[in-house]
């Protein structure tokens, strides 16, 4: 494990001088009934069509309150349609973002209900709206994130509970197999020493990179690298030893190529004595070297970027949303310019008015150019969350 390098001063914040130029509005108000409640995961877009898909953790059929899959057509005035209601039999309470396969199938996971009560993996056919369970969790549970290798058809995921420990696991399943459930494999089980409760994973250069939320050598979570079969697990970095680098890396990892160097950019949530940060890991000439990119100032640019960063259509810009802090203490939307000394710029403060929504646990999705959609878990007209849109001018 390499020692960290602090590549920049601990805080670089440029606040927009005229935030009124950025247009923001809630476009969907969740009611907790037929249209669902409490969206907690990032939206996905179907092949640049402006058609978005997402899930809510709760709501749906009034007698169940177990969550829904929904569709938003941004071209047709943000038309909202629920396409599936979860039940005790089909699994319930989805929290992981959906993934596409060949623009025909949606794959996702639930964390409760189903045959054994531990949730499942499911497939939804967009052509005929059929819903199928492809695996029922039995001795591992709480699937929270998925990553599809579109070349092999292997779906990788992480869970909050592992079969040999209670600290989480990594699994894979072949979704294109005639009977996917027969191909399910648990690849790795986490423990107190290596880190616990994995939150995200990404496949890069035939390796899996996974961050864990807590524990590890210093208690602040870890970043782990392993082979695609779960072997040769390697600790890249243990958070919490150098508190300036942050603690609790929950957000998704983003692969960025900059000046012929590949980097993984990530975020930390922070803790009582650790700040929220953006960090990066070099993958080519400075292999596995962690660097501090920027430290969040809670009162200005916000803190606790729950779901990490996304890379914009403009590849030099990374965008994200914080769940706390800012002028209203409801969070902010920000961007990082990797071509401009990695300057951090606050774009928008989540309004204190509940109508917009707050507790932004899911990340952003750029639709078109400079238009961003995201979920708010709470607030809105009914207090049960919203989907908002922010256009950056």
Image (spheres, grey):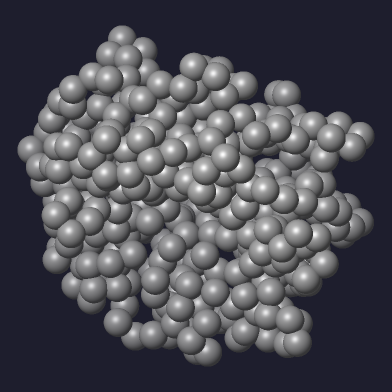
State the image coordinates of residue 25 (x, y, percent, origin top left): 45, 75
Image quarter hosting the N terminus: top left
Question: Vertically, is 43 above or below 66?
Answer: above
Residue extending farthest to the left is 9
Apparent side of residue 303 relative to residue 56 in the rendered image (left or right): left
**Can residue 393 be seen?**
no
Give the quadrant of residue 283.
Answer: top left
Give the quadrant of residue 90.
Answer: bottom right
Q: Tell me what residue is drawn at x 23 percent, y 61 percent.
A: 302
Residue extending farthest to the front is 164
Question: Vertically, is 193 above or below 79?
Answer: above
Q: Tell me what residue is drawn at x 57 percent, y 44 percent.
A: 162
The mark tally for this picture is 0
Apparent side of residue 367 relative to residue 303 in the rendered image (left or right): right
**Can residue 9 be seen?**
yes
Apparent side of residue 342 relative to residue 131 in the rendered image (left or right): left
Q: Tell me what residue is drawn at x 22 percent, y 67 percent.
A: 325
Image quarter hosting the C terminus: bottom left
State the image coordinates of residue 123 (x, y, percent, origin top left): 79, 50
Q: Tell me what residue is drawn at x 61 percent, y 30 percent.
A: 187
Question: Vertically, is 176 above or below 378?
Answer: above
State the image coordinates of residue 314 (x, y, percent, origin top left): 41, 38
State the image coordinates of residue 140 (x, y, percent, origin top left): 63, 47
Apparent side of residue 352 relative to residue 256 in the rendered image (left or right): left
């Amino acid at each position: 494990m390499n020692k960290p390098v602090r590549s920049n001063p601990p805080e670089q914040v440029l606040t927009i001088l005229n935030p009124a130029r950025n247009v923001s509005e809630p476009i969907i108000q969740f009611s907790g009934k037929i249209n669902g409640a409490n969206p907690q995961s990032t939206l996905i877009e179907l092949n640049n069509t402006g058609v978005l898909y997402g899930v809510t953790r709760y709501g749906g059929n009034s007698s169940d309150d177990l969550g829904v899959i929904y569709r938003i057509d941004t071209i047709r005035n943000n038309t909202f349609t629920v396409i599936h209601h979860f039940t005790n039999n089909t699994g319930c309470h989805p929290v992981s973002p959906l993934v596409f396969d060949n623009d025909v199938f949606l794959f996702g996971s639930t964390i409760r209900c189903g045959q054994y009560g531990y949730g499942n993996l499911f497939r939804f056919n967009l052509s005929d709206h059929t819903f199928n369970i492809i695996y029922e969790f039995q001795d591992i549970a709480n699937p929270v994130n998925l990553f599809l290798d579109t070349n092999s058809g292997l779906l990788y995921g992480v869970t909050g509970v592992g079969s040999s420990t209670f600290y989480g696991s990594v699994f894979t399943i072949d979704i294109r197999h005639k009977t996917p459930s027969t191909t399910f494999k648990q690849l790795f089980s986490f423990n107190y020493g290596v880190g616990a409760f994995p939150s995200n994973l990404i496949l890069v250069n035939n390796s899996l990179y996974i961050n864990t939320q807590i524990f590890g050598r210093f208690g602040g979570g870890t970043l782990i690298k392993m082979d695609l079969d779960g072997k040769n697990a390697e600790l890249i970095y243990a958070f919490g030893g150098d508190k300036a680098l942050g603690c609790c890396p929950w957000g998704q990892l983003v692969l960025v190529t900059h000046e012929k160097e590949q980097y993984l950019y990530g975020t930390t949530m922070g803790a009582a004595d650790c700040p929220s940060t953006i960090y990066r890991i070099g993958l080519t000439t400075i292999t596995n070297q962690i660097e501090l990119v920027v430290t969040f100032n809670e009162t200005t640019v916000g803190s606790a970027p729950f779901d990490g960063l996304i890379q914009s259509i403009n590849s030099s810009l990374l965008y994200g949303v914080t769940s706390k802090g800012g002028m209203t203490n409801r969070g902010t939307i920000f961007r990082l310019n990797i071509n401009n000394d990695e300057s951090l710029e606050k774009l928008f403060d989540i309004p204190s008015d509940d109508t917009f929504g707050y507790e932004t646990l899911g990340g952003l999705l750029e639709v078109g150019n400079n238009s961003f959609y995201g979920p708010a878990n709470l607030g809105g007209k009914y207090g049960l969350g919203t989907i908002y849109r922010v256009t950056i001018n």
